[in-house]
Amino acid sequence: MTDADNANVEKLAQLVEQIETVLLGKSEAVRHVVVALLARGHVLLEDVPGVGKTILTRSIAASLHCTFNRIQLTPDLLPTDILGVSIYDAQTAAFIFNRGPIFANLILADEINRTTPRTQSALLEAMNEAQVSIDGKTYPLGPPFMVIATQNPYEFEGTYFLPENQLDRFMLRVRIGHPDKDTERRILRTQPARTRLGELKPVMSVPELIDLQDAVLEVHVEDAIMEYILDIAEATRRSEELTVGLSPRGSLALMQAARAMALLEGRNYVVPDDVKDLAVPVCAHRLQARAFAHDGAGSAADGVFQKILETVPVPR
C-alpha cells in the first residue's frame, strides 16, 4: 500500500475509534454507518427508542468537519418544512427561496416513520440524485450528502409504513440493539452521551472525505465476486417466499458497500466475506415476504433472506 493509502486507513480508524467512545459496545453498527458514508449511501437506523440511534448520528457529525442539520419528523410536518419555501419580497417584487434543513452535508431525519407519506416523499429526489427541484429550479446538495434516518418499530403508536421506493433509497438498514450488561454498566458510570459527545473534535475534513469516497470506486471487484452478488439477487427474485426480490439498485448498493468495507479494512480489493457480512444490512429491507411475521414484515423477509444466503455458493 502507498503512503496515501496508509494515511486513509489511519484516518478511517481514527473516525471509527472516536465514534465508539460515545456509542459503547456497538462496533459493528458504527462500522456499517461509516461504510455507507464512504459509499455515498444513506442509512436507516431501525430500533426501539433509547439505544443510541440519535447519539450515533450526532457523533458522526461531530467527527466530520461538515454541515449538519437535524429534522424532527412529526405527523404535521409539510414537504416545505424540509425543502424550503419561496417567499415574496415586496421590496424587490420577486420571490426569494429560503432553503430548508435538507441543505446540509449530513442530515438526521429523526423518527422518519412518524411523518406522513407525502412528507417522506420530499426526501426521495434528494436521496437518489443529491438535488431538490422547487418552483421549476434544481438545487444541488453536497457533496458530500448523506441522510441518516431513525425509525421506531411499526408496532409503536403513531407510525407509518415506509413505502418500498423509500426503503430502496437506503443503502443499509442498521439495528443497534441493547448493550450487554457490562457495556450498560459502563454507560451508567460514564454517561458518554453527556460527558464525551460535546468534547468530540473533527478528525476529517470534507475534501478528505470526498477523496475517500472517490477511492472506494477504485477498489477492485473480481468477476467471481460480482457473480456472487448477481446470484444472490437472482435467488431472491426466484424465491416463492418473497413477493419482491432484490432490485438492480440493491445489487449495486451491495457491491459499493463491499468496496467501502474493503477500504475500511485497509484493502484495495473485495473478498467474499465483505459481501456476505453486508448482505443482510444492505438487502433485507428491500425485500417483501409473503408471510407476515408477528414482529413485522421486515423480520419475515430477514428470515427468508438468511435462508437464501445460505444456499448461494460462496466463491473461493
Image: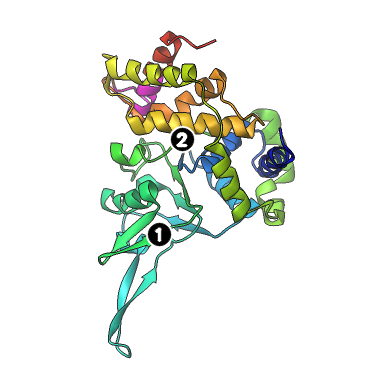
Residue found 48% across the figure and 19% down from its top = 225
Picture coordinates of residue 244, whole percent (x, y): 27, 25
Q: Is residue 21 above or below residue 243?
A: below
Residue found 42% across the figure and 18% down from its top = 227
Name the one closer to the observer, 151 or 140: 140
Residue 107 in sight from this viewpoint: yes
Picture coordinates of residue 252, whole percent (x, y): 41, 32
Residue found 29% across the figure and 50% down from its top = 121
- Amino acid type of the residue that numbered disc 1 sits on in the rendered structure: Pro
Quarter of the image that includes the C terminus: top right
The residue carrying mark 1 is 140
Furthest-bottom residue in view?
Answer: 91
The residue carrying mark 2 is 172
Quarter of the image that includes the N terminus: top right
In the shown orientation, is residue 21 left or right of residue 139?
right
In the shown orientation, is residue 195 left or right of residue 308?
right
Circle 2/circle 1 CB separation < 8 Å: no
Q: Quarter-wise, where is residue 201 in the image? A: bottom right
- Amino acid type of the residue that numbered disc 2 sits on in the rendered structure: Leu
Pair 2/1: label in front:
1
Q: State the extent of the magenta-drawn residues as a range.
A: 292-302
Q: How many marks?
A: 2
Name the one closer to the observer, 293 or 269: 269
